[in-house]
Image (spheres, rainbow, N blue to C red):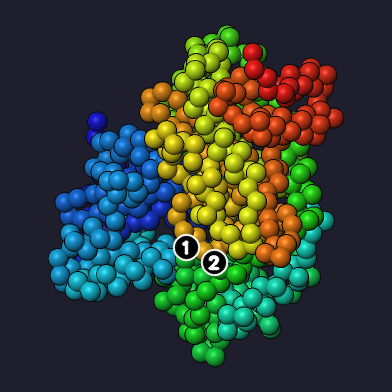
Amino acid sequence: MEKKNITYLANLREAMKQHGIDVCIITGTDPHQSEIPPHHWRGREWLTGFESSNGTNGTAVVTADEALCWTDSRYFLQADQQLQGTGFKMMKEDGPDAVDLVDWVTEHTDKGKTVGIDGMTFSISFAQRLQQELNDNGINLNTDFPQFDYIYPDRPERPKNKLFIHDEKIVGETVDSKVSRILEATKSELANAILLSALDDIAWATNLRTAGDITYSPIFVSYLYLSDDKRVLFVDADKLTAEVKAHLDKYHIEVQPYDDILKFAESLPKTTRVLLDPQKTSRGLYDHLGCTPVFGGSTVAKLKSIKNQTMLANLATAMEKDGVALTKFFMMVEKDYPTGQLTEVELGKRLRALRLADPSCVDESFGAIIGWQGHGAIVHYEATEETDVPIKGQGLLLVDSGGQYTYGTTDITRTIALGGTTPEQCHDFTLVMKGHIALARAIFPEGTRGAQLDALARQFLWAEGKAYYHGTGHGVGFFINCHEGPQSIRLNENPTPLEPGMITSNEPGLYLTDKYGIRCENLIVTEPHCETEFGKFYDFKVMTLFPFDRSLFELDIMTPEEIKWVDDYHEMVRTRLTPYLNAEEAAWMAEKTQPLKKD
């Protein structure tokens, strides 16, 4: 069935003609390269009809006679369904049939033609690669084509939510201390100022948060400029309360309107060597600089990624609160499942309500992924009224969820069996858990990168010709973004070594199309293990507190060490959570954390 997106597409093509654009590329992000941007900048979703509350991964390309939308393997099934009847065709950006977007544009654009982009929504890095390849083939690039200004009359306004202070007793560090460390890192990169565009970096540096600007992340739309003699926050004035203004005054941070950032960038003297992260700063902002740019800035992300002991102690509190909410949730699932009245959408609503019942939980850390049977095999499945199914019969339920507590950010996945188990389900679950345990038990030398550990989690699946294609672990913020860099644990090479204080997820999985999905996820923090004549060695401490489904373990393929790890983990979960549970909940927890035993 043809959708209204056909009209939007026709309007875009008309705007392209009027502005001399032959090919238009549209990103799914904002001027801050946000993973989930405010709705004001989600025009690519509006144009194509491909959308998700858990992220806006997708880049569209429109020519006079073709309309394509690239996305990654997490969204293949979803994109293929949502793009039906819109005039857009899905393109794969990873996997065996991947097609590189820039290569496609270069190959399908004639010499002398013009490619148009809105430079404010493209990173410097991507735009420079695009421009280089286009120039090499005699193709022009126009970086000032804000397409949605021409075709999106009902575009949502920028968010106007009020800011609040993230208590420094929870954070464990003042703004002055953070700014000093940022400037020290800036000077180490031979710059004398830094301009931050990434919203999570700015929220971390200022100890400020908000609720509502970015879905599931308590960060706010702004820019931050720092030098030895000037600190400027570019933010809409109506977002500031008297308390926040006093906080900014205390730390000598001047406030200028958000829209003044380009004028400010143009006014910077040539002697200013401003540090920019080319992956987080927009090409549009770069084009307005009057000073000398210095590319780098990854040191700020590195500073943010290492959590201090105060943060880790408070995150332990957040994990306890999260464990209590999950206990209530899964008890409810088991109790109400036999009625056949539960559905994926209903479970999502109930889980959200249970988390937000705690006053320290500001929001979920992402939209809960609740997939029953075949839906669990869709890695980033989002249950909607159209896709919703009842939870009945025998099967596996995958629940991936988290909370944004003022005490820290949580992210956990559990896969449980309802209505009994099958040998195949138990075997596959245990393969996934063996990988999870292998990574959790890893001991590794200083300087080790995530890519060097990733195979630990995949080895047991690989041995049987099975695999998953998402990363095994992503960095996690502290009451900021659930997904945070620069560290990761994945097959792709990442030069950032894992260091003490860095939090990552541990989430191997297995996905069988139209059958079931399995993912087992805890958050882990890197800690010192020992120091020998061979140097420093690190290991992981598990932060997440909730049991795995004991009924799904196939003990015959587990080693004694693996069984002991599960038993020790369950004992810790029971010990930590029981003081916060009522008698019925405590009894349920005691049963779920009994030692693994063969029948």
- The answer to whether residue 465 is above or below residue 97 is above
Residues under numbered marks 1 and 2 in contact, where contact means CB atoms less than 8 Å apart: yes
**Which residue extends farthest bottom?**
271
User: Mark 2 or mark 1, which is nearer the start of the sequence?
Assistant: 1
Quarter occupied by residue 364: top right
* Residue at 45% over, 25% down: 516
Quarter occupied by residue 271: bottom right
Residue neighbourhood size for the residue with mark 2, other residues' Cα within 10 Å, grouped as few (<14), some (14–19), many (≥20): many
* Residue at 38% over, 24% down: 514
Image location of residue 302, percent across then percent down: 62, 64
Q: Nearer the viewer, residue 503 or 24?
A: 503
| Residue placed under numbered mark 1 in the picture | 31
- The answer to whether residue 289 is above or below residue 537 is below
Image quadrant holding the C terminus, namely top right
| Residue placed under numbered mark 2 in the picture | 197
- The answer to whether residue 500 is above or below residue 184 is above
Image location of residue 455, percent across then percent down: 50, 47
Q: Secondary structure at mark 1?
A: loop
Q: Nearer the viewer, residue 68 or 466?
A: 466
Image quadrant holding the N terminus, namely top left
**Which residue extends farthest front?**
533
* Residue at 77% over, 21% down: 590
Question: Disc 1 residue type?
Answer: Pro
* Residue 53 visible (yes or no): no
Q: Is residue 459 left or right of residue 584?
A: left
Q: Is residue 511 left or right of residue 183?
A: left
Q: Is residue 515 left or right of residue 9?
A: right
